[in-house]
Image: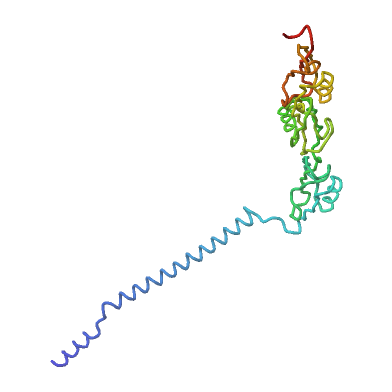
Amino acid sequence: MRLGGSLKRRRKGRRARPGVGLSKHIASGRSIARKLTLKVAILSIVGWLFGYGLSTRVLFPPPPRPSDLFEVPDVTGLGIASARERLAGAGLSLGTVDLLLHPTVPQDLILGQAPLPGQSARPSTDVRVSVSLGPQTRSVPDVVNLNEGRARIILETSGFLVTIDTAASELPRGSVIGVLPAPDSVVVLPTEARLLVSTGPSLIMMPLVLGLQETEATMVLDSIGLVVSDVEEVFRFGRDQGIVVEQEPASDIELERGTNVRLKVGQPGNGGEQ
């Protein structure tokens, strides 16, 4: 009886624990997942390398080797013939020639180029250049005797920069007396055109000639540019005889040169005003 009881106890001690099998199963699953992840990573890298090689070698091939390219020389500032010779020496050729007005670069010299100097270009590449036509020139319009506003419009639409000076003149106020540079002279644009505009005839202060003899009054008025247009004799007694007793316009009035002046001179006896 004792022996049987001992065997039973030993068998019970050898029975496997429930948690051990489950742990082995989980460990096995993790190992498989790691192997699968590694395979996917390897396949991704291989695919990326294949795609990169296909795109860079077949779809988008690299440019020619540097030995097949030429450095573009600088031809700015040269004439067409010299530029063509320099480009040919570099294995390139002269392409389209554009003509442009330029205020400072002399005519027939190259202003710019494409491709730019120092860039690399394939053999027989055409280099496009821009060539100066020199500054724009134009003759000065004759605007003398025109109104200032009209003269300004003509000059500004012709490309001139207009400045104004004024001076007294016999021409009406606002009329152009002269222009510099002289009309019809050829100048480089942009340039300044200076207009000399009339302020009208210079004004003269009417002098006081009352009390002067008629001849004296006439001499004074003639000397300053006024015209004695009418002399009327009026009856006067005593000292007023033979002298100017009235004038029109009155003294201290500003008048234009050539303005007519009327005088009244005292005379004795019959005739004249009563």
Count all numbered tags in the image, as a single digit: 0
Q: What quarter of the picture does the N terminus occupy?
A: bottom left
Residue found at x 26% / y 77%: 18
The picture quadrant where one finds residue 17 is: bottom left
Residue found at x 81% / y 38%: 188
Foreground residue among 24 and 267: 267
Q: Position of residue 109 (x, y in %)?
A: 83, 45
How is the rendered protein coloured?
rainbow
Residue found at x 84% / y 19%: 215
In-image side of 255 versus 45 (left or right): right
Residue at the outermost front position: 238
In-image side of 37 versus 254 (left or right): left
Q: Position of residue 66 (x, y in %)?
A: 74, 59
The picture quadrant where one finds residue 205 is: top right
Foreground residue among 262 and 9: 262
Foreground residue among 211 and 94: 211
Q: Position of residue 228 (x, y in %)?
A: 80, 18
User: Taking 27 as reference, is 210 above or below it?
Assistant: above
